[in-house]
Amino acid sequence: MDYREAEQRAPLKRVWKGMIPIELQLAASDAIELLASAVLPEPFQTFYMLIPRVGYLPFISGKIKERWLDPMLALSGSRTPSDQIEESDIWFEYKGQALKWHYPIGLLYDMLVSDVHRGDAELPWSLTLHVRKLPTAKIIAQPNGQLMRDMFMAMIKEADFIRNGSTKRVMDLAKSDQMQFLDGLETHSYEKYFAIHSILVPTATIADSRAPVSSASSTASNAQKPRGAMQPKAIPVRFYMQTAGSLDDGSAKDAQAAGAAASTSGGNSNSNAGATKQADIMQFHVSQVPIPLYREGSTSELATLADAFKLCYGITDQTNDAFVTNCACISHGVCVPWESPISWLAEHFFYADCFLHLVVVSV
Amino acid sequence: MDYPYLTCREFKECVERFVKRYRSALEDSGTRVEQQTSSTGRQYLVLQRAVYTKRTVSTPVHNEENIEDDDPAGPVSEHIADDGTRIEYHTVYSATWRVPVLYVRVVTSSGEVVLDGKRVCDMVTEDVEMRQAMAAVPFGGALGVTDHPELGVPFLYLHPCHTADLLRAVVAPPGQQEEIGQSVGPDEYLAAWLSLSGAAVGLTLPSIGYC
């Protein structure tokens, strides 16, 4: 690898290696059932772990059980055999909310923890671990490694379809390559994962592309056309926009109107701009629309993050950019400038499932 | 229409036309039909019906001549019963695949949500070969589980990868009716799609008169 390639891959590697320290405590009701006491014995009261932003909770449950729960049960003299806790019993809660375990860990953090966009967010991330009574109405039951792998591959297929118009690349992967890909994900191995990722997404060599800057001077219109054979038809993008109300009881504000409101000067989708109200995962509206590389009607102007937002939320007035002031877009814990070219983000800021997962909050 | 692909607006039109044409026949056959609008203003279609469970009932025999017979059970018969279990079919447009995607959920009378694909297939997919074919689809089978795109809660869904191919192969768009003998436009798109997708999860459409 020459220095140019290493330089180009540097942001990608930093994204991949992003970690979140978590602090786990066992739910009191589960502690009582397992140990006949709500108070855990020292030194098991709290368990600390560094977990990868691009990873998934079911892939860390095994380690948590092995390093914390099983020794705790064994040494506390509990008569409950450790095999009474299955990995698929384990679920996580943050401030009363069950975490959607099929979301990347970093995405969950960016959605739920206050002030990520201010760089002042809670660390370590304090979570409650449960081993009983998974709320099946809220989160998918039976979180386990195999189901997580299947769901992950479904996302990979979808990303392949968006980029290439078919799922051929994924379906043509040799079994050994599939296994390596998943192993790389589960063990958080950059080398194993990217060896196969480069087959699914051959590097589109956007020569001399610069990282987006936060200054007002957008370079999008001056960016060079991507070189190389592999230009995707569109980029897999998901926006998670915080709205008022809850989606599943139908009381959410119209998310499209919220998106439009976010785009008007002085308006925003939450009642108090800047207030650090606890985010509710059910209040996030998820919008997924394939995003073209270029602006509509152009073959040279690269589409920006702001263009993608407008496309997802049906904002047709191209001059209406007030949401740029009212909202922040967060990914991998970083406030992403609205003028960032989607093509650059697609090359450097994707999650392991090849999607860009972008959280939009009011500022 | 760029058959078999749809825009979001075309999908909305297909839903409206489907409901207009099929609501009456579906409701007569015990299927509730609802045209829902999500918080984002997007339309989707909900069909709901009872899941009939098979029960084996044996009629005890009281016969003094067989008093020493250890097995007092008599003839066995099968009944199908409505025990309150309901299945919901949600037809939601996908901007990725540009076709509808079918989301499914079974709710028992006790409120338990069944999201085990195999268990749901055992309940509603009668054709054994179909069940086997569905189970053989790579990465966990034809029925996956994910969050409903509009409701944000867990649902089963039929992987949409091959929907477009199936629609293209089975039903011809207008202009090719001499070859296949049948045409499809917005009036019949959803019916054609549901006939293909629904069969996998126990959804069949009643026939309606054509005018």
Image (cartoon, coloured by chain):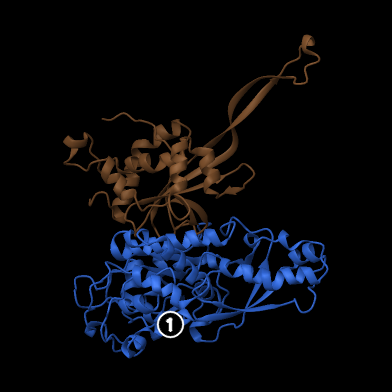
User: In terms of depth relative to the viewer, which is nearer, B110 or B76?
Assistant: B76
Q: Residue at x 49, y 57 (%)?
A: B146
In this picture, is A217 found above or below B29? below
Q: Is residue B19 visible?
A: no
Q: Is residue A216 left or right of residue B38?
A: left
Quadrant, the N terminus of chain A: bottom left
In the rendered image, which residue does mark 1 sit on?
Answer: A13
Please, which chain is the residue tagged with disc 1 on? A
Q: Is residue B189 left or right of residue A84?
A: left
Tell me where residue A201 appears, x and y as whole percent. 33, 70
Q: Which chain is brown?
A: B
Q: Residue at x 26, y 40 (%)?
A: B171
Total numbered circles = 1
The residue type indicated by label 1 comes to Lys
Per the image, label 1 sits on a secondary structure element best described as: helix
Q: Residue at x 53, y 64 (%)?
A: A282
Residue A153 position by quadrant? bottom left
User: In terms of depth relative to the viewer, which is nearer, A305 or A269?
Assistant: A305
Q: Is residue A329 visible?
A: yes
Tell me where residue A177 appears, x and y as whole percent. 41, 65
Tell me where residue A338 appears, x and y as whole percent. 36, 80
Q: Is residue B45 left or right of residue A316?
A: right
Q: Which chain is blue?
A: A
